[in-house]
Image: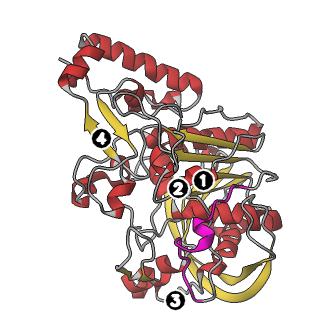
Amino acid sequence: MGSPTKVDLTGTGYVENEYAASGTATSYDPQGALAPDGRWTFQPGSTAAYSTRVLVRRPAATTAFSGTVVVEWLNVSGGSDSDVVWSSTHEEIVRRGDAWVGVSAQRIGVMGGPVLTPTGRGNTSTGLVGADPARYGSLNQPGDGYSFDIFTQAARAVRASGVAMGDLKPRRVLAAGQSQSAYALVTYLNGVQPLTREFDGFLVHSRGIGGLPLAAPGQPANIADDTATSPTIIRTDTEVPVLDIQTEGDLGAPLNSLGARQPDSDRFRLWEVAGAAHADMHTVGPFADALGCSMKINNAPMHVVVKAALDALEDWVSAGTLPATAPRIEVTQDSPPQIARDADGIALGGVRTPPVDVPVDVLSGTPGPNPSVICSLFGSTTPLPTERLAALYPSRDTYLQKYTTAVDSTIKAGFTLAADRDALLAYAQPSRVQ
């Protein structure tokens, strides 16, 4: 995996296994225009043989299994597979007893090649095949146009139980993906899910304004293409629950998800998280300083909210319990609109975490002055001046009391889990208050 942070499953009661998954995949051809309302019509196109990698992390004991499987479309924006959703949610997955399946759906993660995303352009990936030919040399991903059916077939195999799931009997199969993988889920929801009906719910994390293009055979998808950069909502006639969770940083460039903002419904929820960036300190862990950004990157507890989103989606799918309704982040009337901010520069509205509502830093999706594209995704953390902290908090006790109240309010509102109360409290910085 290309993830900068690793999770040790030792002592969790979970096992991890890696499989080669092979078959014949079908591409899709759009019928008519890919309209902004997302009501796309696809029909089967060409077919091609494939063999890819599927990674399974699941409870070893059948009695510990919740019945839910989270199938993640592994992210390849850096040129190799990355389990971003797992990284954000693994604590909740293990607490609930869910199984997790990561699918190497896209060509570059398997076969390698030029990295087409703005953050990686100019680099070349070896893919799994080049990284370890002895282990992965038999794999073959025939192009990203086939990725959607590969993803479907992985979910179908999971639902059928069998070797990969041991004795576990899945009852719910959820799709999840972040960033480029969230683009893919938009396309899947709008064009493929109506045909396959394979997933019971979707966690769409940090989507862009459009969807992943339907690439030609042998080709990778390019998120600079029209499909990815044209405003497209998730179709409003979806039959399964969709929880779309966006950071403040996702609303503007380069993802521009504000252009695809849509109302809530009985099958759709949108959570926009104020003060959060597309990627942050939790995402990159020890590699934060190596990014070369001109100031400290964002350190909001976004992953804590993502865990609550997954929990809410599972309850929605299994019991019909609607997730909390979140206010939208406020924007200005400018053209293009900008994030509306208070006098300290903190975003107004949206899902609010305690470090945002009881600040010692300005947490923002807006980056520092470094012009690099990658730094534009990581936002910023700007310390409030000492005199401002003194005005906000006469004492450390005052600060901690306000912070603790904000933690409990966030939990009560449904945007953080009670099990993560200590994790949120750990973000408090009383030493900053004199």
**Which circle's residue, 3 or 1, is located before the other in the chain?**
3
Residue drawn at point x = 51 percent, y = 20 percent: 409
Number of residues whose C-alpha sits closer than 10 Å to that of mark 2, classed few (under 14), some (14–19) or many (20 or more)? some
**Which circle's residue, 4 or 3, is located before the other in the chain?**
3
Instruction: Residue 311: give x, y in percent of width and height.
Output: 60, 39
Residue 231 painted magenta? yes
Residue drawn at point x = 24 percent, y = 11 percent: 395
Residue drawn at point x = 49 percent, y = 54 percent: 86
- Gap in angstroms between the C-alphas marked 4 and 3: 45 Å
**Which circle's residue, 2 or 4, is located before the other in the chain?**
2
- Indicate whether 132 appears above or below 338: below
Can residue 6 be seen in this snapshot?
Answer: no
- Indicate whether 385 appears above or below 271: above
- Gap in angstroms between the C-alphas marked 1 and 4: 26 Å
Which residues lie in the magenta part?
A: 218-234
Instruction: Residue 231: give x, y in percent of width and height.
Output: 64, 60
**Disc number lying in front (3 or 2):** 2
Image quadrant containing the N terminus: bottom left
**Which residue lies under the disc numbered 1?**
259
Secondary structure at numbered mark 3: loop
Secondary structure at numbered mark 4: strand
- Point out which mark residue 145 bears: none
**Which circle's residue, 1 or 4, is located before the other in the chain?**
1
- Indicate whether 150 appears above or below 69: below
**Which residue lies under the disc numbered 2?**
256
Using the image as rendered, state which of residue 215 and residue 170 is in the foreground: 215
Secondary structure at numbered mark 1: helix
Q: Is residue 276 left or right of residue 235?
A: left
Amino acid type of the residue that numbered disc 3 sits on in the rendered structure = Ser
